[in-house]
């Protein structure tokens, strides 16, 4: 993934924001099956889908799907189609460049691991072409118009519909379902995913109505504080849970199309919220932040309402939400938020 191409930052904490994939060359099988004509809605094809780079018509049910978005591989698999290629997940991913929720679903489906490629230097057009896909999903990506044009010579491409990297999980599900002709199945999947969020809200009632800031601090430079705007999927999922974006973040983000912004640490005291979340990469980082002369003025740091998101895999479930990742995030990440609320009470 290429979030770093969008926001000029270099810290390890900022790497976390890009999350999902980034990295080295292709690996894995190039013959991953994309089985399944079953599950395709009658009359689903041809279908034309609008997106940021135009419109794309798919004539028949795809069987060889390559993905470029942060979590498009999850959406396709959750709908019963195992991709033949997907972006390698290095931040929070396992040795195969995959995730535990993807692997579990793949095993249940009986499919093969996809070929994994890096998009750190742009869309890997040649590697994708080598997989001979009949559909390329990039619903939550940042592919450029030029990349879209090149990829479209390989297979139909479904790009993001609005801002690059800013597609909600609900919209990605809708787009992928239409592209695969599985909107009936997607409706059930959406209900199941929403039910997992509702169950977490019920299990952790102390989170309801609490305000939050999803931040990103950098141990090598504590002179600034970064945060995710309401356009990012991390805050979106916490809002889905029943929490509220901090009013100060709402105000600072008003009118912005960016998913990530930065302010001076001298404004730390203004970042009022019940909960402040930040990634950490190494032992002792959170303690450093809590003792920093400026950062400790963040109200949630003083109250105990901080979340040390040190487990990349658990955090990834929130960063790249999908019907497969969200239940994991609800089970692993939300308890950290609830504990922060309890500490601050």
Image (cartoon, grey):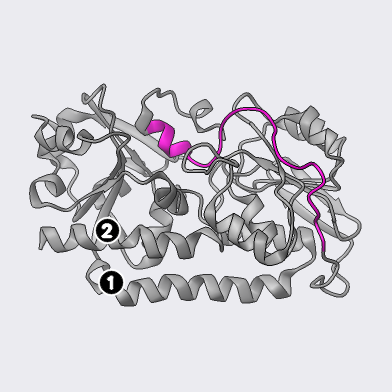
Q: Residue 337 carries which label?
A: 2
**Is 87 above or below relative to 112?**
above
* Image quarter hosting the C terminus: bottom left
For residue 332, which quarter of the picture?
Answer: bottom left
Q: Is 192 on the left-hand or right-hand side of 129?
A: left
Across and down, in percent, residue 197 comes to: 43, 70
- Find numbered disc 1 in the image and state the secondary structure of the residue it sits on: loop
What residue do we see at 36% from left, 25% from top? 11
Q: Badge 1: few (under 14), some or many (20 or more) residues near its Cα, within 10 Å?
A: some
Q: Residue 204 carries which label?
A: 1
Across and down, in percent, residue 194 comes to: 49, 72
* Image quarter hosting the N terminus: top right
What residue do we see at 21% from left, 26% from top? 222
Of 74 and 171, which appears nearest the observer? 74
**Is 52 above or below relative to 263?**
below
**Is 117 above or below relative to 235?**
above
**Span shown in magenta:** 14-35
* Residues at discs 1 and 2 in contact (Cβ within 8 Å): yes
Q: Badge 2: few (under 14), some or many (20 or more) residues near its Cα, within 10 Å?
A: many
Across and down, in percent, residue 256 comes to: 43, 40
């Amino acid at each position: 993934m290429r979030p770093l191409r969008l926001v000029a930052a270099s810290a390890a904490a900022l790497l976390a924001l890009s999350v999902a994939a980034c990295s080295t060359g292709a690996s894995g099988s190039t013959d991953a099956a994309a089985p399944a004509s079953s599950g395709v809605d009658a009359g689903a094809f041809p279908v034309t889908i609008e997106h940021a780079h135009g419109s794309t018509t798919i004539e028949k049910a795809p069987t060889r799907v390559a993905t470029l978005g942060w979590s498009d591989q999850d959406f396709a698999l959750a709908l019963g189609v195992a991709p033949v290629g997907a972006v390698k997940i290095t931040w929070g991913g396992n040795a195969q460049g995959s995730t535990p929720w993807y692997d579990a679903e793949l095993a249940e489906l009986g499919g093969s691991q996809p070929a994994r490629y890096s998009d750190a230097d742009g869309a890997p057009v040649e590697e994708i072409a080598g997989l001979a896909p009949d559909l390329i999903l990039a619903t939550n990506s940042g592919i450029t118009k030029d990349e879209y044009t090149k990829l479209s010579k390989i297979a139909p491409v479904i790009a993001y519909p609005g801002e690059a990297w800013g597609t909600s999980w609900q919209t990605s599900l809708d787009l992928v379902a239409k592209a695969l002709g599985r909107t009936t199945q997607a409706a059930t999947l959406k209900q199941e995913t929403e039910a997992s969020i509702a169950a977490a809200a019920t299990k952790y009632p102390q989170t309801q109505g609490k305000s939050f800031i999803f931040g990103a601090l950098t141990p090598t430079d504590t002179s600034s504080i970064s945060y995710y705007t309401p356009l990012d999927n991390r805050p979106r999922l916490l809002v889905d849970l029943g929490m509220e974006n901090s009013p100060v973040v709402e105000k600072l983000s008003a009118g912005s199309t960016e998913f990530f912004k930065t302010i001076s640490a001298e404004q730390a005291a203004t970042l009022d919220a019940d909960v402040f979340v930040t990634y950490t990469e190494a032992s002792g980082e959170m303690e450093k932040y809590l003792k920093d002369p400026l950062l400790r003025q963040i109200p949630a740091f003083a109250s105990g309402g901080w979340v040390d998101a040190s487990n990349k895999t658990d955090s990834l479930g929130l960063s790249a939400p999908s019907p497969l990742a969200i239940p994991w995030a609800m089970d692993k990440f939300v308890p950290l938020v609830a504990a922060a609320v309890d500490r601050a009470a």
